[in-house]
Amino acid sequence: MLLISKMELSQGSEYKGLYYYGHEVDLFKTCNLPDSFWVSHGWGSVNSDLKGFYKKSTKEPYQPIYIEFIGHPHYEEPDGIEALYDETVHISKIIKIEALVPSGCK
């Protein structure tokens, strides 16, 4: 069950939560909610900046980092592993990224 409706995930919304990356995982989870989102960030600086920071800042695969970004839902028929997630969200612009997860974000 989605706790965040598609209306709330409108074009150009601000998102805050946890980002995970690893083999077949490119995941965003909003703080304190159970929903998980496959991340679509295309190619270019957003993709390389996020993955580069993740690789430099984590010691283990699938270790969460904290991220705030501007994004929007990406409505496309899920393919493969993407189908396991509640929605797909596209990251347009990174606002804040930190290796340490704030205590209020789980």
Image (cartoon, rainbow, N blue to C red):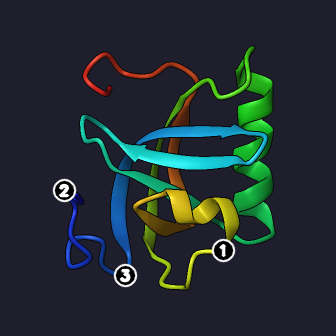
* Position in image of residue 45 (x %, y %): 77, 62
Which quadrant of the rendered structure holds the N terminus? bottom left
Q: Mark 2 or mark 3: which is in front?
A: 2
Residues at discs 2 and 1 in contact (Cβ within 8 Å): no
Counting other residues with Cα less than 10 Å from the Cα at mark 1, is it few (<14), some (14-19), or many (20 or more)? few
Residue beneath the point at 30% across and 79% down: 10
* Position in image of residue 12 (x %, y %): 38, 76
Which quadrant of the rendered structure holds the C terminus? top left
Q: Secondary structure at mark 2?
A: loop
Which badge, 1 or 3, comes first in the chain's sequence? 3
| Gap between marks 1 and 3 measured at Cα | 22 Å
Q: Secondary structure at mark 3?
A: loop
Residue beneath the point at 26% across and 76% down: 6
Question: Which residue is labeled 1 in the image?
Answer: 79
Three-letter code, disc 2: Leu
Three-letter code, disc 1: Asp
Q: Residue 83 vs residue 72: left or right?
A: right
Residue extending farthest bottom: 76
Question: Which residue is labeled 2 in the image?
Answer: 3
Counting other residues with Cα less than 10 Å from the Cα at mark 2, is it few (<14), some (14-19), or many (20 or more)? few
Mark linked to residue 11: 3
- Frontmost residue, 77 versus 10: 77
